[in-house]
Image (cartoon, rainbow, N blue to C red):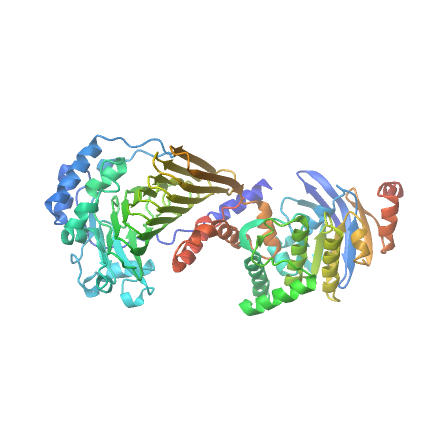
Amino acid sequence: MLEIKDLFVSINGKEILKGISLEVKAGEVHAIMGPNGSGKSTLAAALAGRDDFEITNGSVTYMGEDLLEMKPEERARKGLFLGFQYPVEIPGVSIVNFLKTALNELRKFKGLEPISASDFLKKMREKKDLVGLTTNLANRSVNEGFSGGEKKKNEIFQMAMLEPRLAILDETDSGLDIDALKTVANGVNNLRRKDNATIIITHYQRLLEHIIPDFVHVLYKGRIVKSSGKELALELEEKGYEWMENETE
Amino acid sequence: MKDSKDQILTEVTKGDYKYGFITDIETDTIPMGLSEDVVRMISAKKNEPEFMLEFRLKSYRHWLTMKMPQWAHLTVPEIRYQDIIYYAAPKQVVGPKSLEEVDPELLRTFNKLGIPLEEQKHLSGVAVDAVMDSISVKTTFRESLAELGIIFCSMSEAIREYPDLVKKYLGSVVPYTDNFFASLNSAVFSDGSFCYIPKGVRCPMELSTYFRINAANTGQFERTLLIAEDDSYVSYLEGCTAPMRDENQLHAAVVEIVALENAEVKYSTVQNWYPGDRNGKGGIFNFVTKRGICKGDNSKISWTQVETGSAITWKYPSCILRGNNTTGEFYSVAVTNNYQQADTGTKMIHIGKNSRSTIISKGISAGHGQNSFRSLVKVVKNADKVRNFTQCDSLLMGDKCGAHTFPYIEVENESAIIEHEATTSKIGEDQIFYCNQRGIDTENAVGLIINGYTREVLNKLPMEFAVEAQKLLQISLEGSVG
């Protein structure tokens, strides 16, 4: 589904990612872990197509196509979803309006008619239950006045509504209390299917107690220094990231 | 990063002005320039009674003593008043009795603008007075409104047919000495709409005036007078467009509203004059005086404006809250893109006890646009328990535009409660990217964000026009993200 080969990314001339290679297949859950400043969020943003990053080398193939050639909205329409570390507020725009616009863009891309109002509301109810969202978000403006936890839940809710092929969750667990963490994890687990894949970017391993990854990668100073099964997360938690440094030298 | 920003910026600013065409029609114009003779000529052309000519002449003489105001945050190139044609009228039967008498070319023009003058084709529930250059072309639904005692006609007709009403109210809210542009207008105004709602009548349809400038080198000086008797209600809408021309054209209008006891007047404007091209060439200079007086107790005047056009906008729809328990409202969205400049806002003059006012202003600046909000909230000594709430938000798109606010508050009564809130924000790349990441392209993302930002104001417009205004905002701002 996704194949990253020797990817180098700079921001303002500073090299952040220094040769990342990673392959994600349908049905898999990958966790990317690493300390602050290791380049985790840069990787997420570069894959989503944020334009303040400069790709200086390497290639990314997504569903057989050159991902780096696509505009951010094309990537989204082809099923790539980014759960933001810091979801953005859009005052005055209701979640209903926002999601309906987004969903209809995806449908238009697939050659489908815009969704009817009643189908849309039905879908919203379904997904709200699936994600375990209790508050009535529909009429509130996108992320405006949301608590940290609500913002993250709203990201997962959007993911449920838009049904992506590849979801990249950037630090979705940061700043969450244990209940919110469970809600987020339940959402991700409930949406797990054979034909989609998830990349979870996280600093801590506690989210990985609730979402069991197939692979864990350690990103350190712009490189993936170790890849292994889920047990790697525990090892990291125990030994810290400094241990990685010795490991790589 | 900088390059891609600039590129988006250029892309988004190329939204084209849809109404820039010129109608090729025979026009009756008078020679260029302004003098007492010209004032007399205009009055004669319109067969006006003596009192109107007197009004015009004393206005003209007063105007000669005045200088153009310099306090606005605007850079106005010199306006040569002798190079303007003060009267231009499409040649047609004067005061057409039926649609058959209206020049088909004019009908086509207004159809093209989306303002069909055939009553059966028009949006149900909206009566239109269509004004091209200096004269009213046609007023629809006059007869059905007349059955309720409502007078809705062109200003010229009102002067001839209802001289007593005109004499009583014209200049009563905006005196001919009020300001430079109001004096000029009082001297040379050509047409506009007149509306009178009798006591106890709730006007069953939206009344609207559509202003079109067509002829070259002319100024448009229209005059609107709206009188709402006791216990009456009316909702009024004004729209405007002009052809794309390289030279600037002057538009200096005056609107006066009188609301008597328990009367309510809603006045909405969607201003889409030609704003000039992307380099700031051409466009309308819009210097307008709009003022209403809540004369009777419990009366209410509400101004809603969506200002997207004009090269320069100078406009402060205001309320004099003279009666007790009166309400004044001002809701505004003003957009400046490319090299447009706007200095707009309102005055709320609280004289009556328990009078209240609300001011909501949403400025949007893009390109090299300069957008100023200016307001005065004044509470006189005897006005007890006045309430005012002002909210003034500015949104910036890109890094070459400007937003400025000049709020004035003068309170002479201690019981007044005055609130003022202001915010300045920027449409961030973050917001755009967030939308992009959900599959929404940049153009639609800007539309979505702008609609969210202006929702409070657009909600105040009559339904059909809110939709139009939404589209207009999106077109005006296409591509201006950075």
- Looking at the image, which residue is at 24% across and 54% down? B196
Q: Residue A25 vs residue A159: left or right?
A: right
Q: Quadrant of the N terminus of chain A?
A: bottom right
Q: Residue A205 vs residue A114: left or right?
A: right
Q: Quick check: can you spot residue A61? A: yes
- In front here: B67 or A1? B67
How far across and how far down the image is residue A235, in percent?
A: 88, 49
How far across and how far down the image is residue A82, in percent?
A: 67, 54
How far across and how far down the image is residue B267, in percent?
A: 34, 51
Report the number of discs.
0
- Up/down of B265 relative to B178, above or below: below
- Looking at the image, which residue is at 60% across and 46% down? B430
- In front here: B153 or B168? B168
Residue reaching furthest to the left: B50
Q: Residue B418 vs residue B260: left or right?
A: right
Q: Quadrant of the C terminus of chain A?
A: top right
Q: Quick check: can you spot residue A48? A: no
- In front here: B463 or A220? B463
How far across and how far down the image is residue B57, in percent?
A: 15, 38
Q: Residue A123 is drawn in which quadrant?
A: bottom right
- Looking at the image, which residue is at 81% across and 50% down? A205
- In front here: B481 or B53? B53
